[in-house]
Image: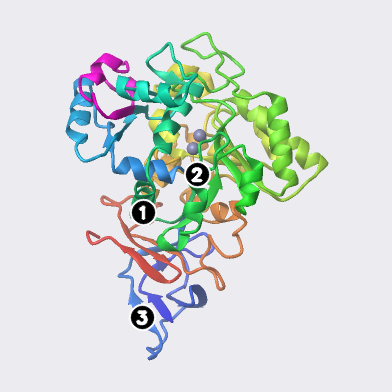
Amino acid sequence: MRLFRNAKFWYKGSFDNQIKAILCDQGKIVELYDAIPEAQPNIEQIDLKGNFVYPGFIDTHTHSFEGGLYSLMIDLSSATNLQDVFDLIANGVEGKGKFIFAWNFDETKIKETRFPTRAEINSIVKDKNLVIRRVDGHSCMVNSYAYYNICQTIPNFHSNDEVFRGLENDIAVHWFHNNLDEELILRSYHAASDIALQGGFSTIHTMVGDANMSIGHYSVIKERLDEFDVDFILYPQSFNIDQALAVGAKRIGGCILADGSIGSYTAAMYEPYYSKPIRGTLYQTDAFWREFITRAHQNNLQVAVHCIGDRAIDQINKVYMALANSDYKDLRHQLIHCEVTDDALVNQIKASAAVPVMQPMFDYLWGGDSGFYSKTLGLERSRIMNRFATFMSRGIRVTGSSDWYVTSLDIRNSLNAVINHHNPSERLSPAQAIEIYTENAAWLSHDENCRGKIAIGYDADFSILNYDPAHEVDDPKIVAIIKNQKIVYINDKA
Ligand SMILES: [Zn+2]
Ligand SMILES: [Zn+2]
């Protein structure tokens, strides 16, 4: 048995309480004390040095394989011009194998405001496959070496544009992923587990598969879940319901796409973009979604679909609504991202009981009156985006996530972003911010009776930070992660 003491414990939505110590046994919380009990030989006491103990934080939407893999690859986020991009790639290629991923490319953040040309990147990497992925994952480009190889294995693959968007983007990226060996796949997940712990999480939901008909290495990871310190909740990210059922999945989907992204002008909007006279793209028909979601629902699978623009959110939510009315089941179907929602659409989401699985960091990076969303969609529409507070005030359970690798897997950034939302009327209180990463997140996977709270009978999963988000500190740190009462991560700099 283990007794955790000398800390402030998050209990019933506050640190303002009398809890002085927590006793854990066999991975569960068995007692809460308002005075530290006397030492006993069979109880190991752990001194938490006055830090803040939260229920283990849960990120409800990540792409851990890509995140882990890319952490081993080339990060372009520091580039301010194309020369930086070329230098980062040239300096990073060594020792990375035959498939090189350069990610976090954002043409809006570099001086030339454009992608490189294929000729430019050919001069840097000639004899290995190189892909440069845009920061949102919805466009990419490859060098000639990779383009030739992709065309060899995918006969009808063709693109008029050197920058791939939509389907071409997906095909090219999955061609890269599918060519990696199992050793690198496992190394990627181990890297992801380490990054999740360092980022403050004890559990992360993770998407596995090519967002088309393949569930990829789902079984490989499912059989090895015990190897990882973080708890991965797996989603077969696929349209293949039979395969998902065959491997025993309880859910299906993830970033299976109803639309694309705002940065790639493929998010499906009811009104045209402000900066271009187009409305984005619905990737599938209404009938397609009706059939897919209904069949998954009939088989008791929780469904998750990527939808960013109001037209795409409405398309998916209408199917959820029809099922809620005709064949209600407590499956907690998900609207991943759910970014653009006017009041009428918020009401529709309330009525369908769908769950917005949202990313505070999207607002942090691209929100605000002078931010990218405002420039692309117009000021008015940018103010009805990422409506955390509106959803919560309507009693709609929002869950928090990073969409990592798209944004950082770090609870400090996520809490900070949602507490300081660009739009003051969409800010969450610190307690609500914690709620979307604990109680609500546990509820999403039907784990509300064992996770997301510090309470007797709950899992002994704790995230230990050196601060309370209600009070700013100069140096916010993640101190340690405890999983099933075991200390799985200690920050030696804290
Ligand atoms: Zn995603
Ligand atoms: Zn997505």
Three-letter amino acid code at disc 3? Answer: Gln
Q: Earlier in the sequence, mark 3 or mark 2?
A: 3
Tell me what residue is drawn at x 21 percent, y 35 percent: 92
Q: Earlier in the sequence, mark 2 or mark 1?
A: 1
Three-letter amino acid code at disc 1? Answer: His
Q: Distance of mark 1 from mark 3, alpha carbons?
A: 30 Å
Q: Earlier in the sequence, mark 1 or mark 3?
A: 3
350 relative position to 23: left or right: right
Residue sitting at the far right: 326
| Residue in front for this viewpoint, 375 or 298 | 298
106 in the magenta segment: yes
Label 2 neighbour load within 10 Å: few <14, some 14-19, many 20+:
many
40 relative position to 144: left or right: right
Q: Secondary structure at mark 1?
A: helix
Please give the residue where the numbered disc 3 appears in the rendered image.
Answer: 45
Quarter of the C terminus within the rendering: bottom left
Colouring used for the render: rainbow
Q: Distance of mark 2 from mark 1, alpha carbons?
A: 15 Å
Please give the residue where the numbered disc 2 appears in the rendered image.
Answer: 208
